[in-house]
Image: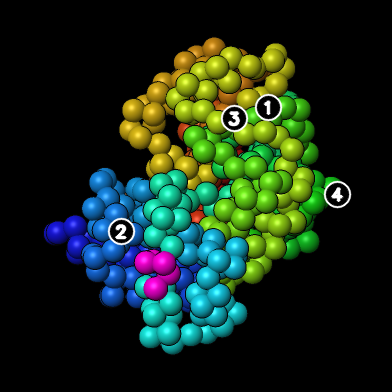
Amino acid sequence: MTNLSDLKEDFRLQARSCAALGSPFMDQLMQLMADRLTPGDPVSDALFNWRGDRSASGASVPLRLAGGLHMLVLCNQDPNLRSVYPPNTPSDEALWTEVSNALKRHDKFLLEFIKLPPQTNEIRRSSVMIAASHLLADRFGLPMVLSELGASGGLNLLFDRYQLIVGKARFGAADPITTLAPDWSGPLPPDTRFEVINKAGVDLSPLDPTKDKDHLRLLAYSWPDQPDRIERLKSAAPHQTTKVDKEDVADWLPRRLSYHPKGHLHLVYNTIAWQYFPPPVQHSCTKALEQAGARATITSPLAHLAMEADEKSEGAGITLQIWPNGEKYNLGRVDFHGRWINWSKDAILT
C-alpha cells in the first residue's frame, strides 16, 4: 500500500468506528476525508507523510484532525465551517466544501494542533474504575491510593466522586457530582464501599480543564453531534483540582510507586492510553509495576487496572492484575466511550 491508500483506509476505519459509537456526523466527516482528501496543501501533505502508525491503534491521526476542526468551530474561528457542523445536517458537498477550505485557511493552526494525540478524557470510562474499586474494597477492605497513567485533564481521577447506576443499584459516591448509567450486562459488583485517600496522574501533555484554553481542547475531542458527552465534561471540569504531572510516564511511575503507605491499596490504572506509549515506555511501565509488585504485601497490595483495545472484536478489554501474587483477572469488556459494559461472571477476586 502507498501512503495515500494507507491514510484513506485509516479514515475509512475511523468512519466505521464513529458510526458504531453513535456519531453519524463523524462517520460522514471521516468518510469524506477517505474519499476526497488528496495531497497538495500543508495539512494534507503532513497527514499523508506522517511517519508511524496513523490508525486508531496508533497515533489516531484522523481524530487529531477532527479535533482541530472542531476546535475551530468551538472558538468560532470559522463561521462558514461552523454553519455545516451540528446541529446542522449538511450534504456531503456542503460539508466537504467548508472542510477543505478550512484545511487551507487555518493550516498553521491545524498543523500545530495535530502534533498532540487526542485527549478524550471520556468520563463514562469511570464506570469501570468504580466497579473495579468495589471489587477491590470487598477483597481487601483498605483505603486506596490512585495513580492514573495518561491522565489527560484528570477527569477520570474524579471517579470516586461519580456514581454508577445499574438498574436500582447505586455504586460509587453517595453525593455525586455526576452520574453514569451505562447499559450493563452481567453480575453486579459487590456493594462494599471504597475510600480514596490520595490521587495523582501523569501525562506527557496534560490539560487543565479549569483553564479556558485546555477546557476547549478537551471539548474539541468530544464529537460534535454527541452533546451529552460535552455536557458531562463541562459538569465535571470545575471539580478537577488534582494537578496532573507533566512528565514521561516511564520516569514518573517508578517514583510514584515508591509512595505506598502501609495499610493502603495502590491502584494504578489507564484507559485507552497504553497504545499511545512507545514500546520502550510500555516496557518500562511493565517493569516498574512488576518491581513494585514484588514489594507488595497482603496488607499493602498493588493493583493495575487497564481498559485498553485488544485483538478482540467489540469494545475494549478490562483487565486487573493484583500483587503480591500477580494474579490476573479478566473483568469483561466495555464500549470505548463507556456506553455499555459486559461485566464478566468471573469477575470475582480470590
Q: Secondary structure at mark 4?
A: loop
Q: How is the image coloured?
A: rainbow
Bin the neighbour count of mark 4 within 10 Å (Cα to Cα): few under 14, some 14-19, many 20 and up. Answer: few
Q: Residue at x 46, y 71 (%)?
A: 26
| Residue type, numbered disc 4 | Asp
The answer to whether residue 208 is seen in the rendering is yes
Name the kind of residue labelled 2 in the image: Pro
Magenta: predominant secondary structure element? Answer: helix
Q: Which residue is the site of mark 1?
A: 145
Pointer 1 or 3: first along the chain: 1
Q: Earlier in the sequence, mark 1 or mark 2?
A: 2
Stretch of the chain drawn in magenta:
101-105
The earlier-in-sequence mark between 3 and 4 is 4
To which residue does mark 2 refer? 42
- Residue 145 is situated, as x and y percent measured from the top left of the image, at 68, 27
Which marked residue is nearer to the observer: mark 3 or mark 4? 3
Disc marking residue 245:
3
- Is residue 314 visible to us here? no
Residue farthest left in this picture: 1
Label 1 or label 4, whichever comes before in sequence order: 1
Kindly give the residue lying farthest to the right in the view shown.
Answer: 175
Assign a secondary structure to mark 2: helix
Labels 2 and 4: the sequence-earlier one: 2
Q: Is residue 254 left or right of residue 75?
A: left
- Amino acid type indicated by mark 1: Val
